[in-house]
Amino acid sequence: MHRRLIVPGVLAASLLLTVPASAADHSPGSAGIGDPYYPASGNGGYDVSHYDLRLAYQPGSDLLEGTATLIAAAEQDLSRFNLDFGLKVSEVRVNGKKARFETSGSHELEVTPAAPLAKGSPFTVVVRYADKPSEVKIDGYTAWARTPDGGIAAQEPESAAWWYPSNDHPLDKATYDVSVSVPDGTQAISNGVLTSQSSQLGRTRFNWRSDKPQATYLTTLAIGKFDITRDTTADGLPIVNAYSKDLGANAGAARASVERTGEVAEWLSDQFGPYPFNAVGGYVPNVTSGFALETQTRPFYSPKQFAKGANTSVVVHELAHQWYGDSVSVNGWKDIWLNEGFASYAEWLWSEKEGEGTARELADYTYAQYPADDPFWTVRPGDPGPDNQFDAAVYDRGALAIQALREKVGDDDFFAILKGWPAAHAYGNAKIADFVNYAEKISGEPLSQLFDTWLYQPSKPDAAGARS
Ligand code: ARG
Ligand code: ZN
């Protein structure tokens, strides 16, 4: 294809040249998608619709190798584009042809295709790589957790760069096929449905498919020796749970909690509307960390969460995120309250249903826990800053904000909002302001002052005032 190139400059002002399509009239995609909390996260200029990851892992040496195939479309005329990736790459192809690549910044892979990409055109990227993810540090840190029998990728806001190249931001969701080969006797767990499993030459390959839009950080990989349970919910949804064989004293409590996944998902469907994905479940690997993560269809739980006995709250929390966080994702990371406030509030609703304290009682208790001079109140849940993204204020004050909304608009409108919001933005992205507008639309009440008080003021709200 030939294009007209307008050569800038005084002498060339009116000179029109016809030249073959080249990088000259295309520009590089930006190295970040434009999130002020994480300027290097994601990339500009293209959108990925599907990831196909075909990997092999050696638990003994932590070697992860394979190919990632990305189906994408150019959103501008692209001379080159970036992927977010930290592992060693041996080859990149774009539309089948070898592409130049180099690494820059902390985890940017700059790809220059043999031919530029025209805006709107679909393209395919193949990246071949091999590395030991536990040894790969990005900003001094690895999100890959090596365990005695395998390795786990589960972190927020970023985990992908330690195991596959991506456009690593929730604004660019895609579907996934994840195929992983491991030694016989070891399992590989990922998102969605296990479409097939086969063994040969002493190795077993697990093929997982997640067929709804999925954010990069919600894509997980767990390799290890697991006990796997399978069931189906009353709605016909496949349930797959996996427990490390190495959970020690926490094994019973982990099962007593995570085996309630089907029951919890059905109850949440009554609160939030139809379950958005093709499978449900959870996995508990033998990690030493203490957090959980709402990895899509299959949350990650750490054994520590079950150290004091069964913990259905954490199961409710991570499954609530399937609607609030996974189907409806943040537009930027400052919108994290849309995830954590609602997942925390779901725990209060569960408590209310279980007769262990109403949401109102738990809100009063939580409010009283933090005196007015506690630094807790200086963190603004509506814009906490990257260092406080997972601060208790985002969770606890975030849930208090939702209780304040409930008391302002009444239960009928409140539960209509809780159920309507995930449908209004299913599989998309939203900002806090979108939620405020939506709640105002459903309730017919002006709510900007209430949300300003609860989400944006660096001080303890007057509870009584906010409830009036
Ligand atoms: N979204 C997760 C949860 O609420 C939080 C993960 C935070 N990450 C961490 N390393 N603590 O369950
Ligand atoms: Zn959460």
Image: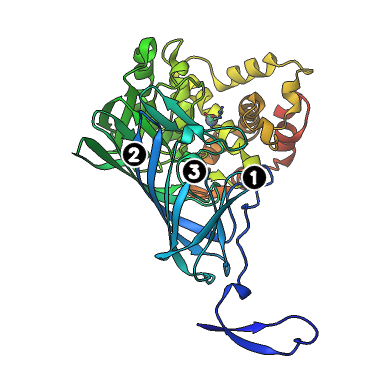
User: Separation of disc 2 and disc 3 at Cα?
Assistant: 30 Å
Please state which of the two labelled residues, at mark 2 or mark 3, is closer to the viewer.
3
Query: Element under label 2?
Result: loop
Three-letter code for the amino acid on which mark 3 is drawn: Leu
Question: Who is closer to the viewer here, 349 or 62?
Answer: 62
Q: Quadrant of residue 26?
A: bottom right
Tell me the element at label 1.
helix
Q: Position of residue 73 (x, y in %)?
A: 48, 63
What percent of the width, then of the height, locates residue 127? 43, 53
Alpha-carbon distance for marks 1 and 2?
A: 33 Å
Horizontal relation, residue 58 to residue 408: left or right? left
Q: Residue at x 75, y 38 (%)?
A: 449
Residue underneath mark 3: 87
Outermost residue toward the left?
A: 200
Residue located beneath label 1 in the image? 440
Q: What residue type is labelled 2?
A: Ala
Nearest the viewer among 460 and 360 is 460
Taking the spot 62% from the left edge, 24% from the top edge, the residue there is 396
Question: Marks 1 and 3, Cα distance to the nearest angstrom?
Answer: 46 Å
Residue 7 higher or lower than 409, as above or below: below
Residue at numbered disc 2: 279
Residue kind at label 1, given as amino acid type: Glu
**Res. 353 visible in picture:** no
